[in-house]
Amino acid sequence: MEAHGERMSGSLPADLTSFVGRRRELDEVRRLLSSARPVTLTGVGGVGKTGLVAEGLTNREIAGRLVLSQRTVKTHVSRIMTKLDLGSRAQLAVWVVRRDG
C-alpha cells in the first residue's frame, strides 16, 4: 500500500499529516508538552491508531492495515480509551476531531 506515492521505512505507508511543513503547529505542540504530561500509546509507533479508529475503521481493518492481530488492536484501542477516560469509539472520534480542530 502506498499513500501519496511515499513509503515509510519498512512496509507501512507514509501518511501525510498537518505537521509536515507546519512550524506554528510544532511550536504549539512543544508549548503544550512543556506544561502537560503526554499520553503514551503502546504498539507500532507513529502510525495513528487513534486516528484510524476516528476514521471509523474496525479492529479488523486496523489490524490489516498495520499488520497486527485483531486482539492486539482491540487491546490498544481499549488502552487508549481507558487513558482518555472515554466509553466508546464514537467518543474517541469526537475527541480526535476536537484535538485536531
Image (tube, rainbow, N blue to C red):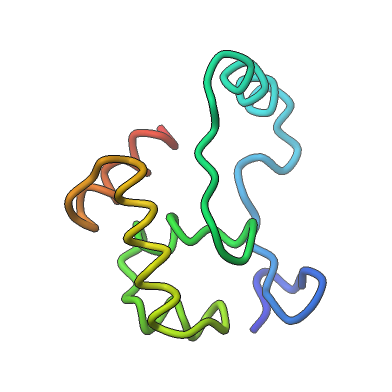
- Residue 43 is left or right of residue 90, and the answer is right
Residue 96 locus on image (x, y percent)? 37, 44
The quarter of the image holding the N terminus is bottom right
- Residue 27 is left or right of residue 47, and the answer is right
Q: Is residue 10 above or below residue 30?
A: below
Residue drawn 30% across and 48% down? 82
Query: Nearest the camera: 46 or 57?
Result: 46
Residue 43 locus on image (x, y percent)? 57, 64
Residue 10 locus on image (x, y percent)? 79, 78
- Residue 26 is left or right of residue 76, and the answer is right
Q: Quadrant of residue 70?
A: bottom left
Residue 77 locus on image (x, y percent)? 36, 62
**How many discs appear?**
0
Residue drawn 30% across and 66% down? 56
The quarter of the image holding the C terminus is top left
Residue drawn 77% across and 69% down? 8
Residue drawn 64% across and 59% down? 45
Q: Is residue 92 above or below residue 58?
A: above
